[in-house]
Amino acid sequence: MTISPLFKLLLATAAVILCWAYSPVGIHIGLEGYSPGHLALLRFLLASLVMALMALFLGIDLPRWRDLPWLLVLGLFAIALHHVCLNHGQQGLSAGASSVLAQSAPIFSTLIAFFWLKEPVSGWRWGCVVLGLLGAVLVVAGDQGLGAVEPRGGLVLLAAFSWGLYFVLQRRYSGRYGVLTTVCYMVWGATLLLLVYAPGLARAVVLAPLRVNLAVLLLGVFPSALAYLAWAYVLARVEVSRASIALYLIPPVAMLLAAMVLGETVQPSVVLGAVVVLGSVLAMQLEGRWRQWRNGPRAKRRGALMQGD
């Protein structure tokens, strides 16, 4: 029995969504036995090992020496800084709320592109940015209630900012290597940076409960490694703008997992904030598609009518 390419694509997409939706749940459990720094380091030590096995069997390109610094910078913002801030921030937020804020990275990418790279930003995108930031505030404030807002919860937004900065930097260096090659060197570079948290890690592993260590093992193998391989498979067959729409399913799946595994109750204000944040990010993508439609088939039809006149 042969499996159709479409079914393989759907299976790979579902695996990506499930793996990345598990991430905030795994982090929540991991923080029961590890400090935020230890959790980030152990997670990516495991991911580095899995990536090494991938590189051995699937093969990756050797990097040029002059590219090593930017690969390290990508690893800093995409992984090291992002996950340390995420781990610290999730100490003050639920797993469901954290998954929503983590998807706000395109909002920060727009701000970075405007203020740093001086790229023009349309009024539509500015409206999306303002709306998305308001939604993020609603998620943070509504997660624990206004009277119990935890300042560390704002660090999840810093993690999203770091991820957004990675998006901007990655655009400038995309195309030099394949997705798997880039991710391998990013993970290895970030793990080197995270070694600053190595003191005391061995003792923490010994003292951590089995449930916690199992959760961290799953974090290192699936969201941090295998999900990237599945995502590379999807991106090789579907254009990025279409494939990324599937990522909007991550927060609701994460909320469902958090309710099932952690017993979390999702606050209505968090759901409302999630709709606002994800809606604003989706609207940014719709603007690009609207421009393509306006400048593509619509423009061709208008030209044909003018020629007919």
Image: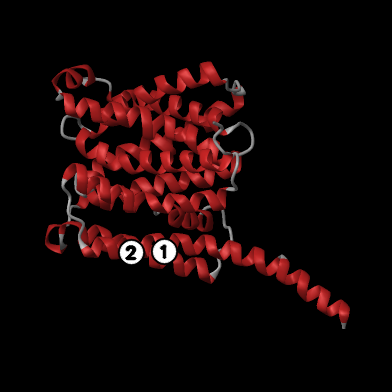
- At label 1, the amino acid type is Gly
User: In the figure, is residue 82 to the left or right of 267?
Assistant: right
In this view, 70 is above or below 269: above
Q: Can residue 127 be seen at all in this image of the molecule?
A: yes
- What is the quadrant of the C terminus in the image? bottom right
Q: Position of residue 284 (x, y in %)?
A: 50, 62
Mark 2 or mark 1: which comes first in sequence?
A: 2
The answer to whether mark 2 and mark 1 are in CB contact below 8 A is: yes
Q: Where is residue 70 in the image (x, y as percent from the top left)?
A: 53, 33
Q: Nearer the viewer, residue 27 or 108?
A: 27
User: In the figure, is residue 27 to the left or right of 60?
Assistant: left
Residue matched to label 2: 135
At a point 43% along the width and 43% down the height, the residue shown is 14
At a point 46% along the width and 70% down the height, the residue shown is 127
Q: Is mark 2 on a helix, strand or loop?
A: helix
Distance CA(mark 2)–CA(mark 1): 9 Å
Q: Where is residue 279 in the image (x, y as percent from the top left)?
A: 41, 64
Q: Position of residue 232 (x, y in %)?
A: 53, 36
Q: Can residue 154 be seen at all in this image of the molecule?
A: no
Residue closest to the far front = 1
Residue matched to label 1: 279
**Residue 159's quadrant in the figure?**
top left
